Amino acid sequence: MSIELNALGKAYTADNWVLQNVTAHIESGEFFAIVGPSGCGKSTLLRMIAGLIPISTGELQIDGKVATDLPPKDRQLTMVFQSYALFPFLSVTDNVAFGLKARKFPAKEIEERVTKAIKLVNLEEFKDRRPRDLSGGQRQRVALARAIASDAKVCLMDEPLSNLDAQLRIKMRTELRNLQQELGLTVIYVTHDQVEAMTMADHIMVLHDHKIQQIGTPLDIYNRPANTFVASFFGTPRMNLLPARVTADRELTLADTLKLALPKPLPVADYIVGIRPTSLYLLPQGEGEPNAQVKTVEYLGAQILLEAELSDGTPIELTADPDENYQAGDWLSVGIDGNAYVFDHTGEVQFMVEGGRQHASRSHASAQA
Amino acid sequence: MMLTKTHKTLRYLVLVIMAIIIIGPFILGFWTSLLPTADIAKGTLFSTHVSFQNYVDAVQQTAIMRYLLNSFVISVLTMAAQLLFCSLGAYAFVFLSFKGRDFLFYVILATMMLPFEAEVIPNFATVRQLNLLNHYAVMVIPFLTSAFGIFMLRQSFRQIPPELKEAADVEGLNHWQFYWRVTLPYARISLFTLAAYSFLESWNQYLWPMLTTFSDKFRPVQDGLRQLQSQETFNNWGMIQASAVIVVIPTLIVLFVGQHYFKDGLNEGATK
């Protein structure tokens, strides 16, 4: 079942828009993530799709039919909540069967569906327990089973993994994704965690400041960010955003320190250039002209993260080989060797400068994280 | 903090003394219910004539069983009505939104500030007008609901996580279904508490039934006990004590059974 959001908007009081002009198309069987920082309206949007919050403007279509004003139960969807929303006085089995009983399914079918759903989430030996006797991960599985048992083909998930510990969250990500594929569910998944969205989703909608910032595949979002917000929200470590100005016909100078050759001339104005730490290289110590000073060194295992300052004082994050021995206070020589994104002063992307070391030809394989 | 031995002994000493002060009269009452009235009158508390004869007499010679039945009928009806109407009222104040909802709630709260004694005269006039005097109805109808019950259940219903309501909405439960299948089971501890409270409150009513009942057919126990004393010029204290013990038994049962349900943590696991 496909879902069509057509210029949806929500205002609780006149002209105080929580969400504005949200338009998207969600394919049947797709894993669609809605990502954004706290308070960006992503949970509101999910509840508008569910019918729990009335839609102020625009149109919602589910499976080709207008559903803008349908009550939640007629929208043929299920919902998994961040806090699980289990009924504490019911056993696992009864929790899973709750919706089916409410919808008056025949007893035999309820039993079949419930047994199958509990089996899918591996909770067979816990089926007679109460939620209070289960761990957080198991409770989360009960909530999932409840969604699976329903005959609805659309499942809305509101940060379902954010109450789990880090290890379990990573494990559940894979399980959730596998289940979704196996059952052919259309999932709309709200999260504030960009890694979760990147690893699980087919398409991502980035919400910020009550508006859609970008919709695209995880690769699109990562490699072709539409603006500085998306650019800095996705990817760890974060993309460096450096102030830039035009210093020659086809040249930008970033933070008065780094030079970036442009494929085409730009009108004279202020720009912002985004470069991921992985698209910057460091010359071996002692070589080249030093242009950045290390402030802190963080060991991440496979690489080290350096927080440094360019010679004009602009902070910049760099990654380096863990074998190198960097100390705070060291002077480095930094150069650009991957993709760089040129944004105008409002943050909208202008174009991307394909990577490659300026004075040596190297592929920009490092741009793929 | 570890208590020193002297500290501990002192604490227990105080507790034991307080326990004796509180339980003493009950034990005395129970003991005298086993003694013949002649011994009680003489003041020989340590009599050896211990028997259950007073109980037999109470059951055979007085209307105590009828009083018990009356009280039981009245208390059960009051309790059932309060559970139903208070929970419905509280549900409306929590889950329905309508104009003047909060104002109405405060009006209900305000009625708690009037002592019952202040309402006795207008209430009496009303029930007399309605021709309800000397009937079970007169002891049940004025107590069908209570502001305290609505207040208590409203607090309890407000603890229900909003996600449960949302989950129920997605599954298409209407208000009646949500009330019956989620709200009541979720708040069952509060419901048990209210049940015990309203049962005991009704069981221990004295002033109102004294004013509105005139015959043993409808008189509840507390007034019945009083009746036993004034009927005869010579009070059969042993029998009266035996009746009093009989009257206390249901109270003890309610508290004892109720205590089992007043456990914490029954609602854990609904949400993280």
Image (cartoon, coloured by chain):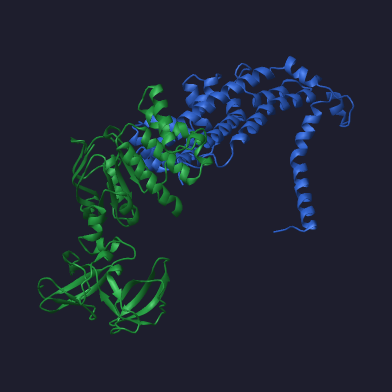
Residue A222 lies left or right of residue B143; in this view the side is left
- Nearest to the observer: residue A285 or residue B79: A285
Q: Is residue B29 left or right of residue A147?
A: right
A205 over A324 or under it: above or below: above
Give the image location of residue A3, x and y in percent.
Answer: 22, 40
Give the quarter of the figure containing the C terminus of chain A: bottom left
Q: Residue furthest right?
A: B48
Q: Which of the two residues, B5 or A219, is positioned nearer the viewer here?
A: A219
Q: Is residue B191 left or right of residue A294?
A: right
Q: Residue at x 28, y 83 (%)?
A: A288
Image location of residue A33, percent across then percent down: 29, 49
Q: Position of residue A1 (x, y in %)?
A: 24, 36
Percent across and percent down for residue A194 are 32, 56
Is B38 located above or below residue A207 in the figure?
above
Quadrant housing residue A306:
bottom left
Residue ID at (42%, 66%): A300
Say which chain is green.
A
- Chain coloured blue: B
How many labels, in total?
A: 0
Q: Can residue B99 be seen at all in this image of the molecule?
A: no
Q: Farthest front residue?
A: A361
- Quadrant of the image occupied by residue B206: top right
